[in-house]
Amino acid sequence: MAAFDPRKGARVRWTLILIAACLTVRGLWTTTAHAGDWPQILGPHRDGRAEHESLADAWPAGGPKVVWERPVGRGYAGVAVVGERGVLFHRVESEEVVEAFAAKTGKSSWKYAIPTSYVSGISPDDGPRCVPIIHGDRVIVFGVQGNLACLRLADGNKLWARDTHAEFRVGEGYFGAGSSPIVEGDKVIVNVGGKKTGAGIVAFALDTGKPVWNVTHEDASYSSPIAVTVNGVRNVIVETRLKTVVLNPDTGAIRSELEFGMRGPTVNGANPTVMGDRLFMTASYGIGAVFAKIGSASLEKLWESNDLISSQYATCIADGGVLYGIHGRDDQGQASLRCIDPDKQKVVWEKDDFGYATLLWTDGKLIVQKTDGTFVLVKATPTQYTELASAQVFNAKTFALPALAAGRVYARDDHTLKCLDVGR
């Protein structure tokens, strides 16, 4: 791998990793998520799955109907949608703007601005990376310079805010802050990256924003924390820069950890994926994939491979004992869509030269958003690759994660947010 040198074109190479900030696992959401809601990164359970949607089996010749569209500011953060309200997080001039909008029309209802001076030395984009969280009557956002804010969903009034980078002496990293926080119980848990202050991972009280606990001397990654109950024990799992950490969400006590990552110009971008009591992790840059068993106080590595699925930042989706995901790197122009069987350690089927993409699952189908702006509808089956529909939705690079709520996909590129009708 070539040495990292932002002065010699690395800007293009690394732009694509930012999606990770915006990236999976059943049992994660601690508030009741109703059918048709997409309240956080990768959906109700952070696993890219929507259990109660009903999708059309094909699309019109021109692609899914555009219900509405509206301009947006900069950033790679996807939207969150609950009920009739959505939340957008984007940069407008020198502010990161949190904006509530009507899910049916896109019309704005309130805005809250966070001043920012962030300028990326690598990426052409300087906006926020992290998908907002809608949790009950609150909205939680994590800005590119580490500004963590909790707002009232009804009107956008600030309830509390923390400057985590200043408070815990965190550097900006390759692309600024890019790991979406998670709400677990009465805490907001953040992959902060304050390694100098023992605040790699920090929990804040949901009601006040006061720090409750902090652990690890690890840098942050661009993978977002997940939570899962295994054998009756609730865990939060965080991929840091170089490790995967399983901890007690109440106390922050580390139950187990496993080295995952590589020093140098690499990132951990995809969220880990849980399959029962097993954990799947993937990254590119020679890191590869690891499949492990989650024990009460251990992560037992079952296998590791750089050949099955090594994904630059896209989270794999589990269904029916198999994993669907992207193998390859967007910045190198080579990526395939794969279905793998992790138990048998084999590729079940592959669509070569598919292009880099992020995936959502519902109704036995995959909605695939490629970074070239193409959307593809694929039958989710371990038998073979079966394409049901394809459409060019955007004519620009499309990095932000899409949201799927009540039969509609909310997707954006650098300039436009679109609401697409994909329901049956």
Image (cartoon, rainbow, N blue to C red):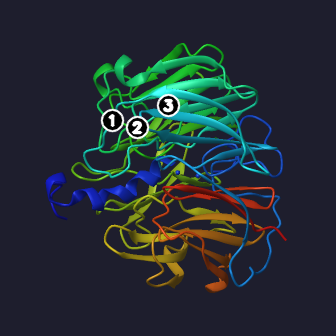
CA distance separating discs 3 and 1:
12 Å
Query: Where 240 sits versus 414, above or below?
Result: above
Q: Amino acid at mark 3?
A: Val
Q: Secondary structure beneath disc 2?
A: loop
Q: Is residue 372 left or right of residue 233?
A: left
Q: Residues within 10 Å of mark 3 (few under 14, many from 20)?
A: many
Amino acid identity at mark 1: Asp
The vertical placement of 222 against 405, above or below, is above
| Mark 2 neighbour class, 10 Å CA radius: few under 14, some 14 to 19, many 20 or more | many
Circle nearer the viewer, 1 or 2: 2
Using residue 216 as the reference point, say whether residue 388 is left or right of it. right
Q: Which residue is mark 3?
A: 190
- Residue matched to label 2: 177
Describe residue 54's horizontal placement relative to residue 169 as left or right.
right
Q: Quadrant of residue 164?
A: top left
Of label 1 and label 2, which has the lower sequence position? 2
Please tell me which residue is depicted at 64% across the width and 24% down the height of the picture. Answer: 151
Residue at numbered disc 1? 219
First in sequence: mark 3 or mark 1?
A: 3
Crowd around label 1: few <14 · some 14–19 · many ≥20 (10 Å): many
Q: Amino acid at mark 2?
A: Ala
User: Of marks 2 and 3, which one's residue comes earlier in the chain?
Assistant: 2
Q: Position of residue 43 (x, y in %)?
A: 67, 50
Q: Name the spot of residue 312 as percent of width and height, x first.
A: 39, 61
Residue 290 picture quarter:
bottom left
